[in-house]
Amino acid sequence: MTRQTKGKIERPFRELKASFLEEVTAVGVPSSIPELNARASGWLAEQIHTRPHRVTGVSPAVRLEVERPVLAPLPRVRYDTALVEPRRAGAPVPLVEVDRVFYSVPPALRGTMVEVRLPVDAGVLEIRSHGSVVATHAVAPPGSEPVWDPIHRRDAEAMALAPHARRHLHAVVPTVGEPLGLLDLGDGDYEVEIPDLGYYGLGDGCGCGSAR
């Protein structure tokens, strides 16, 4: 045997309609908004604020005086309804991911924590660092190609091609028919030159010999 219970539906305007509006109709329709507000204030003070609450057993007027010392005014600025989340910028590629789309940040911020902000229905993504806006992008559909600020891309490419970044990397364009410089040792093994481990603070840094 099962028992079904009915959920309680709150109707805050039921008493307003059954009591206050009936009183307004009986006395006469107010001639202005200030008069309507004055009548509503009197009705609240006499009928609502002095009545004990069914849960706490204390009237709202008494409860207000108890809680007043811990109440504070609302901030003078509007409440920010935007979605705000932390993200870590990629390294070495200065991109942050939001809804399966990558957006660029200044390359100087790669590897650091930034804050992304999505205002409601604005179609704009803001990226902040230490409270300052460092990038603004138009929101792209999920799964789109990475969104780059032209300046971010230029600076990122310049950093990637800088001499210090290419210290142990270089491009080689083989001629037609020229072997790639890998000696096949069989079973998928190749003989290659040992890297200079001294650059990474490992080994003796001689960079000589060969390895499999």
Image (spheres, rainbow, N blue to C red):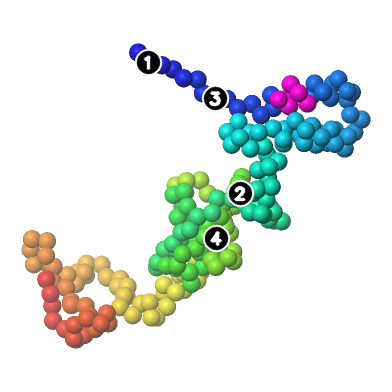
Q: Residue at x 68, y 45 (%)?
A: 64
Residue 150, position as x, y percentages in the image: 54, 64
The residue to which callout 4 is attached is 127
Q: Which residue is mark 2?
A: 81
Q: Are marks 1 and 3 in contact (CB under 8 Å)?
A: no
In-image side of 22 versus 101 (left or right): right
Q: Earlier in the sequence, mark 4 or mark 1?
A: 1
**CB atoms at circles 4 and 1 under 8 Å apart?**
no
> CA separation, marks 2 and 3?
30 Å
Is residue 126 highlighted in magenta?
no
Evaluate whether residue 209 shows in this view: yes
Q: Tell me the element at label 1.
A: loop
Stretch in magenta: 15-20
Q: Is 201 drawn above or below residue 187 in the view shown?
A: below
Distance from disc 4 to disc 2, alpha carbons, whole Å, reads 16 Å
Distance (Cα) linking label 3 and label 4: 44 Å
For label 4, the crowd category at 10 Å Cα-Cα, with few meaning under 14, some 14 to 19 and many 20 or more, is: many
Distance of mark 4 from mark 1, alpha carbons?
54 Å
Q: Amino acid at mark 2?
A: Thr
Q: Which residue is mark 1?
A: 2
The answer to whether residue 122 is left or right of residue 110 is right
Q: Position of residue 1 (x, y in %)?
A: 35, 13
